[in-house]
Image: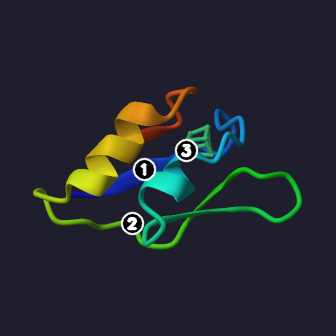
Amino acid sequence: MRIVADQHVCVGSGMCALTAPEYFDQDEEDGRVVLLADEAEDCDTEVREAVLLCPSGALRLA
Ligand code: SF4
């Protein structure tokens, strides 16, 4: 599955980077999400949890 992150919607909470650090990091200046990988296995529960926990709805799976 593909991981999609909308930096314009991201509020820089950091939940994604804490939950799935292999896939998500934060910009050093504004804290917005930086995708480290844009593909994940369908069974990857960390990525799914990160998407669910994002408070702004900036993340989705396609
Ligand atoms: S959890 Fe959502 S709002 Fe927080 S840094 Fe990640 S993408 Fe941005």
- Per the rendering, the mark at residue 38 is 2
Give the mark toward the camera: 2 or 3: 3
Who comes first in sequence, dot 1 or dot 3? 1
Q: Is residue 2 left or right of residue 33?
A: left
Amino acid, disc 1: Val
Indicate whether 20 appears above or below 5: below
SS under mark 2: loop
SS under mark 1: strand
Mark 2 to mark 1 CA distance (whole Å):
7 Å
Residue name at image x 44 percent, y 53 percent:
19
Indicate whether 11 appears above or below 29: above
Q: Position of residue 61 (x, y in %)?
A: 30, 45
Amino acid, disc 2: Asp
State the residue lying farthest toward the front.
18
Label 1 belongs to which residue? Answer: 4
Label 3 belongs to which residue? Answer: 15
Taking depth in this image into account, of 52 and 61 the one nearest to the observer is 52
Q: Is residue 61 visible?
A: no
Mark 2 to mark 3 CA distance (whole Å):
17 Å
Q: Position of residue 35 (x, y in %)?
A: 53, 64
Q: Position of residue 16 (x, y in %)?
A: 51, 50
